[in-house]
Image (cartoon, rainbow, N blue to C red):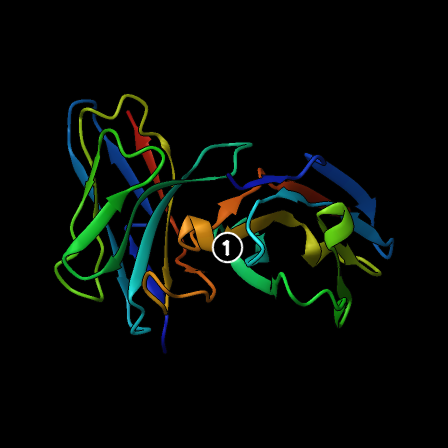
Amino acid sequence: AQKVTQAQTEISVVEKEDVTLDCVYETRDTTYYLFWYKQPPSGELVFLIRRNSFDEQNEISGRYSWNFQKSTSSFNFTITASQVVDSAVYFCALSERGGSYIPTFGRGTSLIVHP
Amino acid sequence: DGGITQSPKYLFRKEGQNVTLSCEQNLNHDAMYWYRQDPGQGLRLIYYSQIVNDFQKGDIAEGYSVSREKKESFPLTVTSAQKNPTAFYLCASRLGGSAGTDTQYFGPGTRLTVL
């Protein structure tokens, strides 16, 4: 069975600080996908990134970067030089072949960036 | 503009009433999903449909019903049998059906409150 753990319930930082959101997953499948979504106060989940289990390359997109490590079953998300607009709830999700690729979501991490 | 629309944005229901939440997509996606989100919780899957005229129960289907008569539409009915329906409801869609490995995209959500 697939499982996603986001141990950080809430993180509070001051603008321009770097912040890392942790995601640890469990799966028995060798083929799986990992996702990060952002949920701003408006409520809609916004897709940020998707990673497949065969690609452990880290990815950078502007101030966002992701670190995928199969050895520790982690897919962590770092925001560099955080901004107030980054304030949101961030969800990590896992989908696997054995689960018909239906994602399982973590409980989310609420990020509050203070000016 | 392609996307997923949900209506209404806010919905109030009296106890004992059935209500239907609308979800429409013009992305030509095969699969559609309904999730429920409670404060401090992740997303929990209610129902999903990977092809027209077919749908499956998710983790918390009791008290809910769906139909999938058209590819574009996947309405969710919250029945009076649902004991605690106050929550935020999110609809999502994905291009592939059962074999699809691609990304889910979400609508803006409907916030249901039982009075």
Is B63 located above or below residue A84 in the figure?
above
Q: Residue at x 69, y 45 (%)?
A: A23
Q: Is residue B62 visible?
A: yes
Where residue B20 sits: x, y (%)? 19, 43
Q: Residue furthest right?
A: A17
Is B11 located above or below residue B14 in the figure?
below
Q: Give the residue number, with chain letter if any, for mark 1.
A: A45
Where residue A61 sits: x, y (%)? 72, 72
Where residue A78 sits: x, y (%)? 78, 56
Side (left or right) of B22 relative to B106: left
Q: Label 1 is placed on what type of residue?
A: Leu
In front: A77, or B54?
B54
- Number of marks in picture: 1
Side (left or right) of A23 relative to B58: right
Side (left or right) of B29 relative to B108: left
Helix, strand or loop for disc 1: loop
Side (left or right) of A104 relative to A79: left
Q: Residue at x 82, y 45 (%)?
A: A13
Is B86 located above or below residue B35 in the figure?
above
In front: A112, or B2?
B2
Where residue A18 sits: x, y (%)? 85, 54
Q: Residue at x 44, y 61 (%)?
A: B104
Is B16 located above or below residue A69 in the figure?
above
Q: Is residue A115 visible?
A: no
In front: B101, or A90?
B101
Q: Residue at x 39, y 66 (%)?
A: B100
Q: Residues within 10 Å of mark 1 (few under 14, many from 20)?
A: many
In front: B12, or A101?
A101
Chain that bears disc 1? A
